[in-house]
Amino acid sequence: MLLPLFPILLLGGSVCAELQVSTDPSSRALLGSAALLRCLFKVQEPISPDTLRVQWFQGDVRILDYNWGSKDSQPRASILEEELRNGNASLTLTNLTLSDARTYRCAVRYKTEEQEGETFLDVFATPRISIPVRSAVTDTETTFLCDVGGFYPPDINIIWLRDGTIRTDSRYAVHQENPDGTFNLTLTYTFTPQLNDRSSTLTCQVHHQTLEQPLEESFSLEVTCAGVNLVPPRVEGDPHGENGAVINVQVWLEVSEIQVLPQWDPLDMVPLAIQIQNFSPRTLYWIEWRWDPGDRWRDESPETHRNPDGTFSATSICRIPIQRFSSPELRVKVLVQQTPQGHPIWRELQVKETDKEPNYHVSEVQGPGDCELGQEVTLSCSMEGAFPEDTVVMWKQIGAENGAVTSNQGDSEGSELQPLLHALPSDWTVTRLQTATSLVSFLTFTPTVQDNGARVRCSFHHDGKGIRETRRSDPIRVQKETI
């Protein structure tokens, strides 16, 4: 998303009769988004690109250099070459980080003239609210947390309100800095609820310079009586005395080890799960997942069901991007706490201890149903999900005397023309586009009369992982061009 920039232009450099360069004084953009840094130039004649050179600098580091037909740039920096004829040398900078907040220079050289302009880019991040605890038990001191995360700059003001009244007895935790430079901060509010506090409205309100108006989240407090509906899954000793009273009761909360689920949806996220059994009342105080290098996620609504004995069981599922999960040093932890006073239970999984089997989906062969004689056609077949990066793709024509063409490991930055293996027609070529979770192979050829009725087979192979996937196209229908 490109954010609007200030309309006022700053004249950069001295004004000359032949070349003028203008830039915006400053602009703002959201962390992770894209920014457009405007740079416009004028000359007193139609612009001739063969005498033009444009350079962009981030501080003192050159990040883009365009010089008549050749362009050298960092991966996230680009200009629209077709706009240069219109005097537009604006820079697009994608996937912004906080370190991108600095001064940029646009330097334009036209024939023998040189001019430049400066602009400052400010990168910010808006806060997010998470409230993990929304219920309490009577006569039990309970701490409610308002977790505010992912914001920058670090100055922030958080307020707890109870039924519209600001709670001055709330307390801040320590600022935590994330690996991307953003910050987290927690404001706690502690009190001992009574039954008449049921349905009280608690509100966490956040004030930050990136917000046009305060960000807030509210909930109605759920209060249950201590001991109500408490049915223990296990009982130690004789559960009934002479008067039928229950004695010597101990409730056990059981938490399974972390498991990798076999069904991945979406395919680029690895699902991890724990089973929590035999607890009551229904609400769990805290479930929090953590993984390196400091990411965390609180599960506020695990899948919960009631057991026949009156207790409850729950499943908590956390999905981690497959790019992160591929690191053998990654550690994943989960914290489960039944009540504010309860003993926290930890479970941990190290990725190198897991056997990550391939989990993928292979599409059918895609392409036009009818082909015109002499007109170039492209077919495609894709693999999505988790698979070895050196998976081999082979294309073969079925029902003809031709051989096969193989697509091996491609260029990570885009398509790469692959060499032909065996005797295919000279105009049959394969390209490959691959990312961490997607592999798309393209077969391009110009059909002849001999191709009519033939099929094309696309196969994905990896001997080490036992991958053998084959897809066949519909029959190729070659039609003579009509006049």
Image (spheres, rainbow, N blue to C red):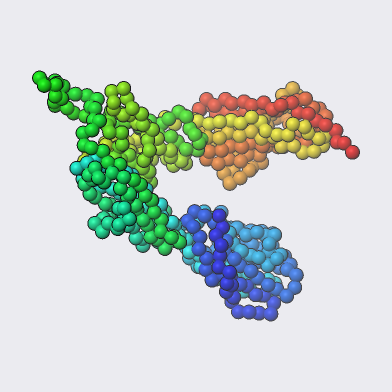
Q: Is 236 drawn above or below residue 209 in the view shown?
A: above
Q: Is residue 294 left or right of residue 429?
A: left
List the single residue furthest toward the left: 242
Name the spot of residue 175 as percent of width and height, x first. Answer: 31, 56
State which quadrant residue 298 falls in: top left
The number of numbered badges drawn on the structure is 0
Name the spot of residue 335 as percent of width and height, x first. Answer: 30, 39
Name the spot of residue 26 as percent of width and height, x first. Answer: 52, 68
List the single residue furthest toward the right: 483
Q: Is residue 192 left or right of residue 444?
A: left
In the depicted view, which residue is nearer to us: 21 or 316? Answer: 316
The quadrant of the image that shows the C terminus is top right
In the depicted view, which residue is nearer to us: 38 or 464? Answer: 38
* Residue at position x 55%, y 68% in the image: 6
* Residue at position x 21%, y 46% in the image: 192
List the single residue furthest toward the front: 196
* Residue at position x 67%, y 26% in the image: 472
